[in-house]
Structures are given as C-alpha cells and as structure tokens.
Image (cartoon, rainbow, N blue to C red):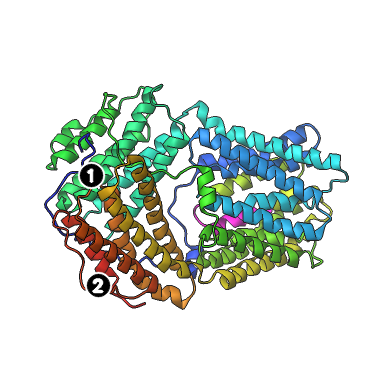
Amino acid sequence: MSDDKKSPTYNHTEIHHKIEASPKAPGIKAAFRFNHASSPWVRGISSGLSSSLPILIGILFSHLQYGLIASIGGFTYLYTKDEPYAQRAVKLFLALLGVTLCFTLGSLFADVKWMKTILFGVIGAVSVYIFGALKIPGPSAMFFVLSFAVSTSIPAPNLQAVFLHAGLVFLGGALSWCISMSGWLINPRGPETAAVAKAYRQLASFVGSLGTESFHAEQHKTVVELRAAETAMKQAKINRKKSSFSHRLFLLNQKAEGLFIFVMAAANDFNPAVSKKAQAVIETFASEMATLKKHKKIRDVREEIEELSIKEELRTLLLDVNDVLQMKELKETEYIQFSQGSVKARLKAAFHKRSYVLKNALRYGIIMIIAAAVAYTTDIPRSYWIPLTCAGVMLGATVRATVQRGIQRSVGTILGILIGTGILMLEPTGIVIALIVFVLQSTIEIVIVKNYALGTLFITPNALLIAESGHPDKAISYFTSARVIDIVIGSVIGVVGTVLVFKRASSLRLPYLLGDVIRKEGQFLEMLSTEQDEERIKQERNKLQGELVNLRALYDNVIGEYSKTAVKLEGLWPAVVATQQLGYMLLASYEGYELSETEKRELQETFAQLAAAAEQKRAPKLSSVPTLKSYPIIQGEITALYESLQVEI
C-alpha cells in the first residue's frame, strides 16, 4: 500500500467466500471435556507464591493467623493477564484496593446480616459492570466477593483490629503486585511484543483461510487480535521517538494492520497455493517476533518473499515487515487504528437502558442478594459459601456456560472435599500449611485452563485451608458436612436465577443490534462520500469496528441460550456474516467514495430497509440493490447482505 492513504483497486465484482456453518453451543458433555490449552507454568508458580509467601512470613514472625489473612490479598495476582506492564501496574493496584476495601467492608459489617446481604449484591454488580464495560478479561467479581465473604467470618473485636486485618490484606496484595511486575526487570516490552506476535500469528491463519469456509471466522478473530495489539501498544504508553525498539514494535503493529487491509481488498485474487505461501512467511514473522528483544536481529527472509508469485503490493508489505525486523529505517504509513476509547468514555457508554453490560451487572447483583439472603436465613455455619459459590457459577458467559459451571462446580467441589478432608485430618501446621497452599494454588492455575471442574477440585481445599486453619477444632466436621450443602445450594441459585432472569436476554437483543450495525454501515458509507474531517472519520471507524466485534460476541451468546427464540435466530447467521464482511470492507476503505445524489438516496433507502428487515426478522421490502458502477465490490457486499436477509424468523 502506498503512503498517500489510497486503497489498491482490483478488477473483481464478486465476493465468493463460502459461509461456514453456524457455530453450535457445546452440550453438557463439554463440562468434562479437556481443552488443548498450554499449561501456564509461570502463572501457576507465581500465583502459588502470591498466596503462600504471606503465610510463610506470618509463620516466621509467629503469627500464622496474620499470614493467613495477608494471603487473601494474594488473590490480587489472579487479575494478572497479558497486558503491558504500565497498564498492569495500574490495574493490579486498583484490584488490590478493591480486594482490601471488600475485606474491610466484610469485617465492619460481619454481624449485620441485612447489610452483608446487600453488599454481596453491590460488590458483585459493580465489579461485573466495570469488567464488562471495559472488556477486561479475568475473574471479574469472583475474588472481590471472596475477600468480602471470608472477612465476615474472621473475628475482629474492635475497629483497630478491622484496620489491622485490612492492612495485612493490603500488604499481601502488594507482595503479589511485586511478583506480577517482576517480569518487567527481565523483558519490559514482553507483553506488547507478545500481543503483536499473536496478531501476526492470527493474520497468518486469516491469509491461509482465503477461499475456505473458515474465512469469516478467521477474519473476525484477526480483527479482535489487531484490536488487542493496538490496545496493548497504547496501554504500554510507547514513545517511539525515544526508543528504537518501541518504534520498531510500533511499525510492526502498523504493518499488520496494512496487511489485513490489503488481504481484505484483494481476497478474491488469491489462489490456495499463494495463500499458503504467504501464510508460511507471516507465520515465520510471528515466530521470530515472539523472541524479539532490543538490538536483536532475526532471520532474514527477503529471498523467500521475492520468490513468491504474489501481487507487488503484498510483496512490498511483506518486505517492509522483514526490513523492520532487520532494524532498517522505514517511513510510517497511516492505517486503521483499532482504538477502544478512554476508560471514562467506555464506562459511560455502557450505562444506558439498553446496555447488555448494565443488565448483566444488575442481574448478577440481584441473584447475589437472593443467594446471600438464603444463606443468612439458614443455620449452616460459614453460610457465606452459598453466595460465594453462586458468584463463581454466574460468571459463565452464557446460560449454557452457567449451567455447565454449576455442574463443574458441584462435582469438582464434592471431590475437592475429599482432598480437603484428608489434608485437615493430617492437622498441618506452620510451614506445611504454606507449602500446601503453594501446591494447591499453583495447581489450580495450571489445570483450570484445561477444565474448570478440574480446577475446582483444588479451589475448595485451598480456600477452606486459608479460611479455616484458624479454627482447627471445627475444621474437619465443618469441611465434610456444610460444604456439600453450601455448594449445591449456591450452584442451584446461580443456575436457576440465570435461566429464569436471563434466559432470552441475548436473543431479544440480537435483531436490534444487527439492524443498528447495518444502519451504522450505511451512515459510514455516506460519510466516506461526503466527510472531509479525518478525525471524525477515524472516530466513526472505531465505533463501527467495535460494534462489529460486539455483534459476533452477541451471536455466540445467543447460541448459548436455552430457548426456542435462540434456535430460530440461528437463521440470522448468514446475515451476521454478511454484515461483518461489509463492515470490514468499509473499514478497510481509505479513499473517499464519489457517489451521486441519486446513489446516496438509493443507498439510504436500501440500508433503512435492510436494518428494518433485520430488526423485524423478515425479508427486506426491496426488489434489488442499487447499482454502484464505480464500486462493484461494495455493491457485491450489499447484495450478499440483502440475499442473506431473505428469511422469515
């Protein structure tokens, strides 16, 4: 692609990629299926250290109980993901403050049942809203709820003891912050480098999928990864003028966006042989980037690129990437910036009556209050495990996922009780407790990516060992009797509440979001033909890109629901694919469209009818799509969308 921001023009008029079958929701058997994810050994060991070191320190100072309390702050580490260290430092510190605050509230209101009940809901709802609005991956409300729940059972005879305990939790969390940030000393640009490498790896899969049924799925994944890489670059606060390595990384990310735009525009000009060769080269780039460090050159693949029978524009882009990796100077080129917007803007944008995030947070909070109310009207000791279990179960992304989590949680916990009973019967003390916590917590993080039920097998004995080691006289009987009842009740409330309250939440939203995205595409196309303000075009491009990602995520939620409506809406899958394809083609457009007034009017009416058809789940009231002689590719995409909506749901 040239530096004047013009898209290449190609002489083809048809979009002929096959549409893959609609994704299917996994059945109940999936609850016990093992994933093929790699085991995160570093994360597991770091997590184990975050939970066990505070206990060990407490033992060394002859205060086991203080060490156990401080280890609750160690759960802060579990909010660590692959974000850049600059962002991680802020996020984990805020998580640390949140865990400490929740623990403090639990201690302050330990004897006030009605306040505890309300706070379970408030903590859950606020956490889910923030994580949902900001799209932060991770355990969401889980460990804020856990910190609050456990603190309600730890005696604090006076206000001084409350703040002493809170301080211990803060110190334990500060230690986990240091452990999480320790990688900065070895490879300060590691997370963002990994994000860019992951984007190239996915880009290679996208190129290899050209002409296959997996094209649209890989296209969506590629946009998600490009967005993640762009976000990582911004979160890392990279100043490419002060660091040659940062500039190098910036250019690699920029060229990935350029490659995506080119492939989108020239998709029909690839044949399988060319696609596979280009895929192999991009995979080489991804592999080399994974170990990219300052002042390090990687394998030069210029000769391999020059031997490829590919279009000159693609060859230039691939050679540019190779030159960046060889630390050669290149001129910057402006491509799509997959921005997510400021934190304040995203929190505000998710707060409205039609917001899925807001409704999800309210649903979570209400069911948590119900679970807590049930818990505190029973005589079961430590009944806070009922809402705590409910909190974990409801973090399933869909209704089906929630049901699966309920099954996994129940089965895993019951088996975990046997492990926990055996541990407590051994009456561990001192350093042995710290060692057991380290092993259990490390194992949780290593195996939970394989299967959630397997992870819960170790979660229960670990959490109870931390919470109950200060009560050795009650631990075994409590562990063996109350746990099963708590887990079953909490799982049932979480599953039943989600099914009843949230059964058709996504199904009801899908037609309206589909219509809204189609309408936005029409408005964006018109803007490209009239608007001269590049900053406004960039803002609208970012909004549309975000909506396209949300559309696919919502469809995935729909197929995860138990309802007749969800089954019927699977008929909208071709329309979802066609809408995304049109949207990504428009996003890849950098040159303005020259449309006549007649074409503009016809397109306005066309998009209005297509949007209405999607919202009303019927065929469009159109006889045909307007002819765009100068832009046959866009016409072909609109036609594909029109044809995909010829259904009655």
> Mark 1: which secondary structure?
loop
Above-or-below relation of 571 to 295: below
Q: Check disc 1 and report the residue beneath it.
A: 591
Residue numbers of the magenta segment? 448-461
Vertical order, 647 against 339 (above or below): below
The answer to the question of whether label 2 and label 1 lie on touching residues, with beta carbons closer than 8 A, is no
Task: Tell me: residue 346, above or below residue 312.
Answer: below
Hey, which residue is sitting farthest right in the picture?
A: 157
Q: Quadrant of residue 409?
A: bottom right
Q: Which quadrant of the figure has residue 47?
A: top right
Q: Amino acid at mark 1?
A: Glu
Secondary structure, magenta segment, majority class: helix
Res. 52 in view: yes
Please indicate whether residue 499 sits to the left or right of residue 216 in the image: right
Tell me which residue sits at (52%, 43%) in the image.
Answer: 343
166 left or right, relative to 90? right
Q: Is residue 445 above or below residue 171?
A: below
Residue 255 position within the rendered picture, expressed as x and y whole percent measured from the top left: 29, 37
Q: Secondary structure at mark 2?
A: loop
Residue 167: percent from the left, percent from the top? 75, 37
**Picture coordinates of residue 283, whole percent (x, y):** 28, 41
Pick the front one: 19 or 480: 19
The residue that mark 2 highlights is 622
Tell whether 152 sits left or right of 317.
right
Residue 51: tell me if it is visible: no
Using a 10 Å C-alpha cutoff, classify the residue at mark 1 as few (fewer than 14 neighbours), some (14 to 19) or many (20 or more).
few
| Quarter the C terminus occupies | bottom left
Circle 2: is it few (<14), some (14-19), or many (20+) Cα within 10 Å? Answer: few
Residue at 54% of width from left, 44% of height from top? 344
The question of residue 363 being in magenta is answered with no
